[in-house]
Structure formats: C-alpha cells, structure tokens
Amino acid sequence: MLSAMSEPRPPRIAIFDSGIGGLTVAAAIHATLPGANLRYLGDTARLPYGSKSAETVSRYALQASRALLGDDGADALVVACNTASSCALPALEAEFDLPVLGVIGPGARRAVASVAPGSLVGVIGTERTIASGAYGHAIAAIAPNLAVSACATPLLVALAEEGFFAGPLVDAALDAYLDPWLGGEPPAKLGALVLGCTHFPVLATAIAAWLSRRGMPNVALVDSAQAIAEELAMRFPAARTGRGAVELLATDGLDRFRRVGSRFFPLDNARLQLVDL
Ligand code: DGL
C-alpha cells in the first residue's frame, strides 16, 4: 500500500549579522526564497564589528550563532555580515555541523562573472573586511588574472543607518573615500565594484550615479546580498515559492532595530524579540 506523501518542510535558514544591516541580506533571501523560514539575529548590543579585531569578531560571531541556532538548529547558517564572513568562518565551521555560508564567496564569484579577463575589481567595506583581504583572496583563488583593489568606507554604514541613501552627505562621503583611492584618472580597467558590506545595497543607486559622474558608467556593482540569495536558491529550490515565517532576534534596542531595520526590510509582521548572549 502506498503511504501518504507528506509535504516537505520548508528549509530553516538562520541568518546572523552584527546588527541591522544584515536585513538587506535577509530581504534578498526572503525575496528569492519566500518559502523558507528565516530566523535572523542582529548582535545590536555589540555592533559595529567592522572596527574590531578578528579575534573579537570571531568570538562574538560564535556566541551570537549559538543563540541563533539554539537547540533546534537550521538547514544552513548564513553569515550576512561581511566583517564576520571575512574572519570568523573557520571558527563557525569548526563549531557547527551544518552548512555555514558567508557572503564573501558568493560576492567574489559574482564579481569574477561580471568582468572581462585582466580587469580591476574594486571592493569597499568596513576596516576589518578590507584589512582581512578576504575578497582579494577569494577572487584570486578563482581568477588569478584579475587585479583587486580595496578601500575601507566605514562612514557609509552610519549614513545608511540614518536613512541617507543618496544626496549631498552620501556624495561627500564617496568623494572623500573614493577620489583618493581611485586617483585622478578613472582607472580604465575598473570593471566591477563589490559592495562588501551589509549596508551598501541601499546605497547602490547613489554609488552608480557617483561612478557615472566620474566617467565610469559601466562599472558593475556587485551586491553580495543578492549573490548569496541566488546561491541559496540553488540549494533549496523548492522554497522559491511559498510563504515562510520570519523571526527576528536582537541583542539590544528593539525600538531602534524596528525603526532603522524597516529601512532595509519590511518588518511590520515579523516577530521581534530580545535575546541575551
Ligand atoms: N555588518 C557589517 C558588515 O557587513 C557592517 C556593520 C558593522 O561594522 O558591524 O561588514
């Protein structure tokens, strides 16, 4: 006799970030895999991670991921934070028996796919991400013929959190960071710019306009949030449709999390709760 077929259960995807910006990654995953159940933890009590040492970021990432996964675990742990992805993946992989996916690999693969051989790939991110050289190593491992140049742009994080996604403040910050980095002449070989920080997808339009004004309209902007969402969709194709649940945890400041987070992800119906690490 044939037994009744049970519906496959939706994949449970745990998403960890230093705070609120990782909601851009959650938003990309939710849009691409609406059938997945998402559980997100933002370590708002201890952000920013981007100015801290690799050892501290790894310790924080382990503590936060333990709280996020709890006893129930997940089908995958996504490290949405570029900073944590750049230095904490080995510690997380050693501790947890599940796929641990950082954003650097997907971002690097997408950057390589979007440029011609011999191009220059630019990377912007936090101080820790840039100091780690993680994007450069990941790109060199798959395309040694590409040159990579990176620039720390930490002020863009604060601007995005304040809701400045475009306008004179964003332009002034881009002038201050990118002009000295790129030099007087726009580098002809710059083929792509990796948005190597959770907050930067919301600044993409302003960054593209800035590059156009500097004579670089064809530079591809690489959104690592979208890149990891698409790689997850290959792992969990059944979740491309459906309606999964979204649960949000933060380690401090739920009011601010809801207010600022709503700029990155519609939080109206999401359950939000405080956790102590
Ligand atoms: N989430 C961090 C990242 O993507 C940015 C914020 C922070 O510095 O903690 O690198």
Image: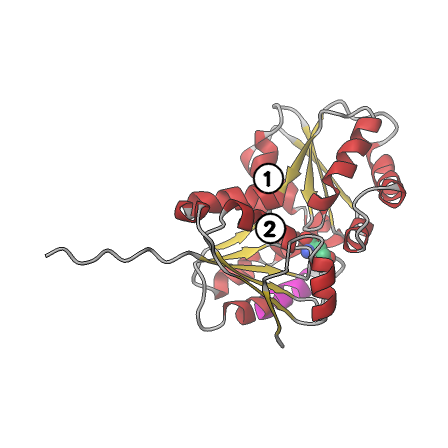
Local secondary structure at mark 2? helix
Is residue 77 in the magenta section? no
In the image, is residue 237 above or below residue 61?
above
Q: Could you tell me the amino acid type at mark 2?
A: Ala
Residue 140 in sight in this render? no
Q: Quadrant of residue 119?
A: top right
Q: Which x, y percent locates residue 87?
A: 63, 56
CB-based contact (under 8 Å), mark 2 and mark 1:
no
Q: Which residue is mark 1?
A: 108
Direction from residue 253 to residue 178 in the image, left or right:
right
Is residue 28 or residue 146 the one in the foreground?
28
| First-in-chain label (2 vs 1) | 2
Q: Which residue is mark 2?
A: 27
In the image, is residue 179 above or below residue 64?
above
Q: Quadrant of the N terminus?
A: bottom left
Q: Name the residue furthest left.
A: 1
Q: Could you tell me the amino acid type at mark 1?
A: Ala
Q: Which x, y percent locates residue 63?
A: 59, 70
Q: CA distance from mark 2 to mark 1?
A: 20 Å
Tell me the mark number nearer the camera, choosing from 2 and 1: 2
